[in-house]
Image (tube, rainbow, N blue to C red):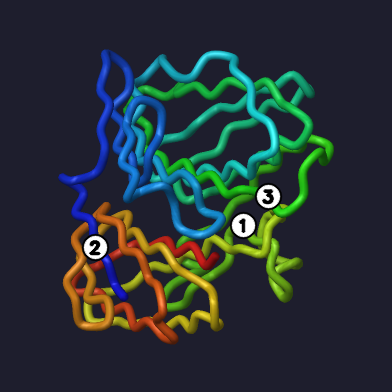
Amino acid sequence: MIDITPFEELGRFDNDWLSARYHFSFAYYHDPARMGVGALRVWNDDTIRPGTGFDLHGHRDMEIITYVRKGAITHQDHLGNVGRTEAGDVQVMSAGTGIMHAEYNKEDEPTQIFQIWIEPAVHGVAPRWETRSFPKAGREGALVPLASGRKGHEENALPIYQDAAILAATLKAGQSVTHRLEPGRKGYLVPATGRLKVNGETVEARAGVVLEDVEEVTITAEEDSEILLADV
């Protein structure tokens, strides 16, 4: 099954500093048919205006992955971590027993991020935060793990406490990449930019694609594209 939700049909929230689109039920947006895919619970598409952001708030027992699409996000938490993650790079926060953090756009332009929440396989771990650079030139024509708890990804990906992976690729127009889903696993695909054919079906930028009972997915860029894929 390949189930496509166009960007225009996602949940939405807008105020004076945040424009958010929700791939799954989140906050005041609730759709019982869209509660996540496997361990993937949240995929938010956020645009944060300059000089604003999320004030100090808490999380626990959740793997929170932030992929910066444009601009940069500045993180600070009660553990003393402070860091700036810019476009193309990734930060991971394992909330564990509890973490208080804030996220701000301190840039002169809007910041665009995907914020992805994955339910952990173990609870009560020590909270942690880490950021890492993933140059787009290193993922041309191939899916590269950005954040993962899967075997074989330990060396290059940011670690998470779940048998899941967030993969990314950049594709030139006409270029394809193929990904196999092991039996019982599901996928969720989002093109950050561009237009794709996914097993022959057209997917526009920032749409969401559920991949279920699919052994192999072939992703072909109809125009230059940047894609993220959750394998859960």
Q: Secondary structure at mark 2?
A: strand
* Residue where numbered disc 1 is placed: 147
Q: Residue at x 26, y 37 (%)?
A: 11
> Which amino acid type is marked by label 1?
Ala
> Which amino acid type is marked by label 3?
Pro
Q: Residue at x 36, y 34 (%)?
A: 46
> Which amino acid type is marked by label 2?
Ile
| Disc marking residue 120 | 3
The correct choice, above or below, for 28 with respect to 213 in the image is: above
CB within 8 Å, label 3 to label 1: no
Q: Nearer the viewer, residue 32 or 139?
A: 32
* Residue where numbered disc 2 is placed: 4
Left or right of 146: which side holds 27? left
Q: Position of residue 104 (x, y in %)?
A: 49, 21
Q: Nearer the viewer, residue 133 or 182?
A: 182
Q: Secondary structure at mark 3?
A: loop
Left or right of 74: which side holds 112? left
Q: Position of residue 58 (x, y in %)?
A: 63, 21
Specify few, some or many for label 3: CA neighbours under 10 Å numbering under 14, 14-19, or 20 or more.
many
The correct choice, above or below, for 4 with respect to 48 in the image is: below
Question: Which image quarter holds the C terminus?
Answer: bottom right
Q: Alpha-carbon distance for marks 1 and 2?
A: 24 Å
